[in-house]
Amino acid sequence: MDSCLIRLTTGLSELSLPLSESQIDALLQFVQLLAKWNKAYNLTAVREPLAMVNLHILDSLAVLPHLKPSRIADIGTGAGLPGIPLAICRPDCRFTLVDANAKKTRFVQQAVLELKLGNVEVVHARVEQLPAGEGFDSILTRAFASLPSMVDSTRHLLADNGVLLAMKGQTPHDELAAMAADYQLIPLTVPGVDAERCLICIERLKA
């Protein structure tokens, strides 16, 4: 994992994220777990741990400056992305990781146990089934659904002053045009990733 450590620390430096040694160790342990379980569970199309550092870990952490604490939901978390890397970096926040795929939530729950992440709850459910509760300050999605669908399905979960953060590749012009909400488009730079990345930040949902 020496090459993964070098790539991770280089990327963290480029992102200006000063993490502790224990946090870096936890991120690398998560990569190991993902690579191990991926062989049997087919959690991600990315197979190589070195590629996972850029495409999964650093990609997830690129949104860290835009999070609004302290209650955060990761909807359609899949293999725990971006929720687990973010939870490792923000132990002061509470994360709820939601996915409808039982196979993936089993892996995420196991990862949470092995990484001893006391600030993470894993929920196996469709987002529409989640009770509103007190609302989340930030709701994150990564390759989850089209923007209009995402706004509709998460509207009831967002706190009054909460923010909806959609991680996207290329700017989804058609989706933005069809969306009944005010938004901010934030370009993202992910170390080691040449492909276009952006974050759609929606701070106020229209009825």
Image: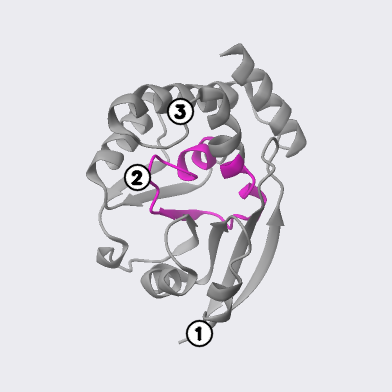
| Residue in view at x 68 percent, y 43 percent | 190
Residue kind at label 2, given as amino acid type? Glu
> Which quadrant of the view contains residue 19?
top right
Q: Secondary structure at mark 3?
A: loop
Q: Residues within 10 Å of mark 3 (few under 14, many from 20)?
A: some
- The N terminus lies in quadrant: top right
Give percent across and percent down for residue 62: 64, 46
Q: Earlier in the sequence, mark 2 or mark 1?
A: 2
State the residue in front, 21 or 199.
199
Q: Which residue is mark 1?
A: 206
Q: Is residue 151 magenta?
A: no
State the residue in front, 72 or 140.
140
> Which quadrant of the view contains residue 177?
bottom right
Q: Which residue is mark 2?
A: 121
Cβ–Cβ below 8 Å for labels 3 and 2?
Answer: no
Q: Residues within 10 Å of mark 2 (few under 14, many from 20)?
A: some
Q: Which residue is mark 3?
A: 47
Q: Secondary structure at mark 1?
A: loop
Q: Is residue 80 magenta?
A: yes
Give percent across and percent down for residue 11: 70, 32
